[in-house]
Structures are given as C-alpha cells and as structure tokens.
Image (tube, coloured by chain):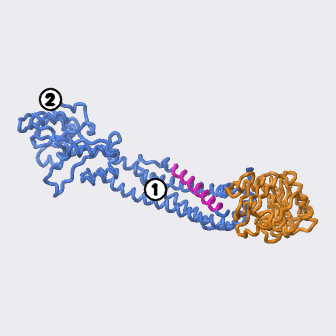
Amino acid sequence: MKKPSFHIIRPLLLTGEKSSSRWFSYIGLGIGVLLLLLSLQLYIDIQSLVKQTSIRKNGLDYISVTKTITNANMGLDNRFSPADLDTLREQPFIQGAAPLISNRFEVVASAGDRIPFSTDIFLESLETEFIDTVPPEFDWKPGQTVVPLIFSSDFLEMYNVFAPSYGLPQLSMETASNVVIGLRCEGLKGGQVFRAQIVAFSDRINSLLVPKSFLDWANMEFEGLPSANASRVFIKTKDANNPELLEFLAKKKYRVNKEKTAFGRSKQVLQGVIAGLGIFGVLVIGLALLLFSFYLQLMVARSRDNLQLLLTIGYRPDWLSRQVARRFIPVYIIVVAISLVLTQLMQYGFHQFLMFNRPELSSWLDPTVWVAAIILAALSIFTNLRMIKKLLYKIL
Amino acid sequence: MIHIDRILPSYFQESAADRSELWRQPVHIAPGERIQIQAPSGSGKTSLTHFLYGLRKEYTGTILYDGVDLQSMNADQLADLRREKMAVVFQDMRLFPTPTLRQNFEIKRQLTGFHSESVPIQWAKQLGIEHRLDTPANLCSYGEQQRASIIRALLQPFRWILLDEPFSHLDDANAYKAMELILEESERQAAAVLLADLEIIPYYPSTRLIRLHS
C-alpha cells in the first residue's frame, strides 16, 4: 500500500480537540511515572546505604547467633547441634556458618607480677576465615608452650574502664600485646601452665580466641572429651539485613547482634514505604491511562462517521490506528522525559544537600531507573496503540 | 472474477427468489463485463451493492472474489480489496460533508496515488463541477455531490465498479457525460461494471441484464 498522507485526513479525526481529560491524563501519567521512578531510585539508594553500615569482609557480613534463653528453655541444652548447623548452612541467604567452640576445662589467666591480676576466663576458637584479623602467628602445635590469643577490642576497653578502680594500670593495644599472660589450664585428667600472647585484636568477635588446634587438643588432654557443641555460631551472609534471613532467625528463635540488624529493621520499614509509593505510582499510571482511554473513546465517538467513511473507501484500520497513535508518541516521550528529569533533580538534591557525606551514593540516576523510564514510555506507547486499535476495529 | 453463489438477504422471504435472476441463483461476473441490474424499489438493490462491497453480511450464500469468500476477509483484507480492486458509487453519495470537493478527491486519490493530482480536476471540468471544487461537499447540490462521488470512485485502481443508482440526481445530459467517463475509465482498467438502477438505462451499453425481481 502506498503511504497516504495523514495530513489530509487529520482534520476528519481530531474534531473537538478541547478535551481537558487528555491534559489530566498526561499530568496523571507524569505524576505516576515520577512516583515510580523516584521510588525505584530511593530503593537503590537505600540498598547502597545499608551495604555500608556493617563490618564487612570480602563483601560479606559476619554475625554471631545464639539461642534465645527464655524461662521455658532455661534448663535445657541451648547449644547448637550439628543438625542445627547444617540447617543454617542450607539456607540460600547464609554463605557459611561456624561454631564458636569453647573450653571444657578450667582456665585461669594471670598477668604476672607487673599487673597483679588474675581471673577465671573462657577460651573459644573459630574457623580462621570467620575472624577479621588473623596474623600468621595465630597457630598452635602440640608441644608449643606459647598460645597465641586474639583478644576482643571490647574486652580491652572494658578492662581499661574498671582497671583504675582496682589499682591496675590501663593498657594500650600495643602494651597489651607485650604482656605475657599466664594461662593455667586444669581439668579432670590433668593440667598445664601455658604462656599466652595477644597477637591481634578483633572488632568482630567478643571473645578470647585461641587456635582451634589448641582447644581440640586441650579439651581432650585435660578433660578427656572432644570439643562440645557450641552455644554461639558465626554466620557469614551477603546481607545481614536481608529480610529473609531476619525472618528465618526470628522463626528459629535465634538471637542476633541487634546493632548489626537494627538498620535492617528500619530498612524493612523504609522498603515497605517505598514499595507503597511505587504501587501508588503504578495505580496513578493505570488511572491516567484509563482517563486517556476515555478521551480516545470520546474522540472516536466524535469522529465516528468520518472514520467509518475512511474505512469504507479503503483506508486500512491498521494504518489508521497507527497514524492516530503516532500522534501521541512525542507526548508520551515528553511526559516520561520530564518525569525522568525531575527524578534526576531530586536525586541530585538528595545527595548534594541531605546525604552529602555519603560517597557511596551517586548524584546521578542509577541505570536501572533509565531502563525503567524507557520501559514505561514504551509501555505507554504500546498501550495507547492497543486502545486506539481496539476502538477503531470496534466501529467497523 | 466474481462468483455470486445463491445469495439471499437473510431478512427476505425465500419466495423473493422465485422471480429473481440473482437471488438464490449462481451468477458469475467476468472481467470487462457490463452488467445492468434492474430492480424496482424494495427488491434489494442497495442491499446487493452493500453485500458485494462487504459493508453488510446479513445474507445466506457466498460471494467469492477471485475464489476468496468475502465473509472470511478481515477488516484489513477488506480494506485492501476496496482500495486496489473495487470501486463504488453509493446511492447516498457518502462524501465527507465539511471538506471541499477537492479535499474529498484528495482523500481518495492519495490513498493509492494511482492518478495524478490533475486528473480529478480534469474530470470535474468534464462533468461540469469545476467551479465547485473549493466548496464544502455539504453545500453542494445533490447533483453536484453525485458527480463528485463518481469522480471519487474512479480515483483508484479497480477491477470491478459498483454503481448504485449513480445518476438519480442528474439530468440526462449530465448523466450521459458521467456514464461516458465511467465507461472510459473502466475500459482503460479493463474492469467489469455492475450498474444497479430502478429502470434500464438506455445509454448504458450493457452486455448482460439481470433482473432482481421480474
């Protein structure tokens, strides 16, 4: 078919142009697209903000989990069985789980003559890949009298708080590393005194960590028992704030480090609000398109006779609907482009004036938002063509 | 080739076929034929035109264009048939009312570009409506509108042309000129002419007469 000119038939179709419903539908579409793009960008912003709030290693979060002690389970064994560990490891949102194994014999630590201080302590061991700071000397072989120790930074801080009240000197990290600690281990089957030296401090693990090889050997040597089930487990996960993970832990009644997941809960609320905003945006777009379909119906009803005559003399309904639809394409593109520009301005303002000290955020829109805008424009154009076609074929 | 096979409007009694040479009869129309369909009022002349043009489907029997059933064509195929092969002059003219005659011609001419822009002007001269070219169609007399609708019908390629009382608002002299133009163009395109009217038109050199109701 030779392409006839739309110019000559245009006045026949677009009669009674003063339709305010058309403008309302454009404005509605603009608002809907803006809401949707904005909620998408905010969602992405929150994701990147949350990622930076927890101590991470290799892009993973490490959190410690214990079983919640309640009046009901107080007398029971609340340690993690191998089956519990397997269940944890099977979860898709958990990349690894390792138990914190503890001593089964008595341990008394003393700091020698210079610092007259001695206390019962506990020792724990954990797979090295779960520890944030592992120096090469953190290793122990049977026969070795010096036991390397990884000390919790929090414990040192705690010591420094109460040390002056007991007439003890406060210690810096460096000094603490030089203090030779006496470790007296005693169990049913015997005992031995070791020297322990702090080789590193850990921000992540609130414990006194010794190499696993030492604890396995000592448990057997002094108590005649293998290392027992752990009451604490470390979990390695891509996102400590993952709602699925939090839900799983809550269901299992496991207690987690609240500080690390507190943001997760606010994130859940925020994401809920943003999802609500997005859904509202979708609804507004739907309403705008509905309003536009009313406008189209009105337009087709007004030009019904002309349209019918055009079809009678040989104009293809397919061609006619494409011509009519084409007229609205620039409008849709402009509406979506304006919404995109407004979203960009808001993101720029959000980053520059509210979140200026967060380098993990960008002042520019995420590519996903661009893709979403293109999809929305294409979807509007497609829906519009479908509506026009439907109306035109209906009058045949 | 058109095969009209035993059709009858579904709103007609079967008895209407008793005295008809078309209803419920097999009729074949060959290229280049000139058929005169003579039919008194109410015998279904306009219905037949509308059936053949695919505007209405309330009939039993089949109408085949080059072997394809008209009823099986979708809207776009029907549009292709009308644009490329089938011209029509309606009894009620059916021009766009507010556009001028010139615009009415252009709306049709630009659909195929089969004729150049000067052709409708030349034909308007030939039929004596040249002075009305820039007048909106609804301000023209019936006679002028009828001549304009004949010109519009011819502004396309066609293998068949349907004429439903095409000269009902014209005097003999103007009707004769219009007839000449129609025959000239259909001969040029080797098209078949199907002219339906109340009476036999003496200046129409038909090759066959079909009475809808005798």
Residue A159 occupies quadrant: top left
Q: Along the line of sight, which residue is nearer the eye, A85 or A281?
A: A85
Farthest bottom residue in view: B41
Disc ID at residue A142? 2
Q: Is residue B177 left or right of residue A162?
A: right
User: Disc 1 sits on a residue from what chain?
Assistant: A
Chain A is which colour?
Answer: blue
**Mark before the other along the chain sequence, 2 or 1:** 1
Quarter of the image with the C terminus of chain A is: bottom right
The residue lying at 16 percent from left, 57 percent from top is: A72
Residue A253 occupies quadrant: bottom left
Disc ID at residue A321? none
Magenta segment, prevailing SS (helix, strand or loop): helix
Looking at the rendered structure, the kind of residue marked 1 is: Ser
Which type of secondary structure does the marked residue at label 1 adopt? helix
Question: Which contiguous range is marked in magenta?
Answer: A370-393
Q: Which chain is orange?
A: B
Residue A310 colored magenta?
no
Q: Is residue B6 left or right of residue A53?
A: right
Looking at the rendered structure, the kind of residue marked 2 is: Pro
User: Disc 2 sits on a residue from what chain?
Assistant: A
Q: Is residue A53 left or right of residue A80?
A: right
Residue A372 in picture, x, y percent from top left: 51, 51
